[in-house]
Image: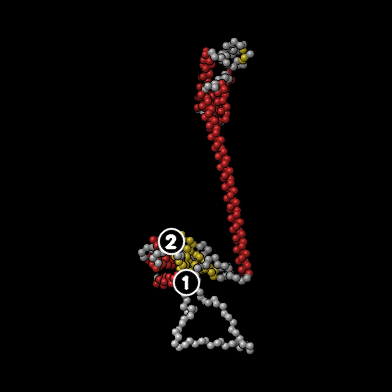
Amino acid sequence: MKFCDHCLAPLSHDATHCPECGLPVTSGTDDPLLIAEEERLVNPRLAHANLLRMRGRWEEAMKACADVLRQFPSNVHAHALMGDIYRDQGNLEEAAQWYKLALDLAPDSTVDRRRLEQVQRELELRQQAQNQSIEMEHLQKQTRFLRVFSASVLALAVLVAIGITWAFQSRAARHGAPPPLSITTSRLPVEASTAPVLPVPTTREGAPAQEPAATQPAPDAPAVKSKAETPLRSEDDILADNVKQWLRQHGVQPHLLTVTSDPLASHLLVTFGYGSEMDRDTLHRTAWLSAAALFALQQEVQTVRVRCLVPMTAPGAEKVMVLGFAADIARKAMPPEPVNTPPKDIPAFFQNATYNPSARILP
């Protein structure tokens, strides 16, 4: 017993047309006339469905194909067209199923096989892209976690350092010690001797003991100066004195000026400071002329690093010197007559200039 492909009415074994709907029986037949009759009935409807697909009216196209498949369930072209419609919508899984059904009906169809292979490759590429996206998202989560963890560790370290510093300063304040200075210079002028003073010995009766008479040198003996009378002076000290003298000639007199040379580098470090508040023009002119003097005195020096110390009142009501400004000045940036450079143009020659926001520098 077989049934009509269009209305499912029972048919006899040798029936060529359905007694109910009158349509030809095409399933399982090799009759070219019946096949041509099916194509005559189906092709215009499939062409209309394909036109709807090309216009993006996918729902109407699917409905037209479904109508064809209800009457001709073995039509290969209707199955392939359903696969095309799903593929245009991006539903590659469903498209692959329809192409497989078309190949089951027509295993020798190279067109449908090629379409199926293309859809399968697109599915593989989509799966690889999804895997890469998942892996990238996982790496981004790990990166965010590491950043948060590093920031937490750094914040904890900063809090511990602040706590240790506060505890140390509190302990020093309780013992009457002055607060530690945040910045110091390499050398500062010594204003008074720090040698300890020994107590004067006394006799048993309480009177101060007489000091032994100093040994008088022989009349013919040459006078010998003590080491205290002839202190040793380094080349940096002599260089600093020359810079001070050159600055005084141009009306610049800082309270403090030291020069430090680095034998491993071709630059000098000059540190100067004022005992009272100063403005930026004075700061810039002192740094500028100090560098010019060092370039004139040391021909091999290519860079001078200048630092300015400014006074600041510490929490213990004591005045300390802190770093208020630092910059580099290159020899190649120095004009032929630096003395005539206007104060407003001097900052343009500074490199890596840094100002301490906590230090008070008058505008």
Question: In the image, what residue occupies the spot 49% across and 73% down?
Answer: 189
Question: In the image, what residue occupies the spot 54% across and 76% down?
Answer: 194
The N terminus: image quadrant:
top right
Where residue 319 sits, quadrant-wise, is: bottom right
Badge 2: residue crowd in 10 Å (few <14, some 14–19, many ≥20): some
What label sits on residue 255 in the rendered view?
1
Instruction: Give how far across and how far down residue 226 sits, in percent.
Output: 48, 80
Q: Nearer the viewer, residue 78 or 235?
A: 235
Q: Secondary structure at mark 2?
A: loop
Question: In the image, what residue occupies the spot 56% across and 87% down?
Answer: 211
Q: Earlier in the sequence, mark 2 or mark 1?
A: 1
Is residue 224 depicted above or below 33 in this figure?
A: below
Residue 255 shows in the view: yes
Instruction: Give how far across and how far down residue 154 sits, in percent.
Output: 58, 55
Whether residue 287 sits left or right of residue 98 in the image: it is: left
Is residue 105 depicted above or below 354 in this figure?
A: above
What label sits on residue 350 in the rendered view?
2
What label sits on residue 151 in the rendered view?
none
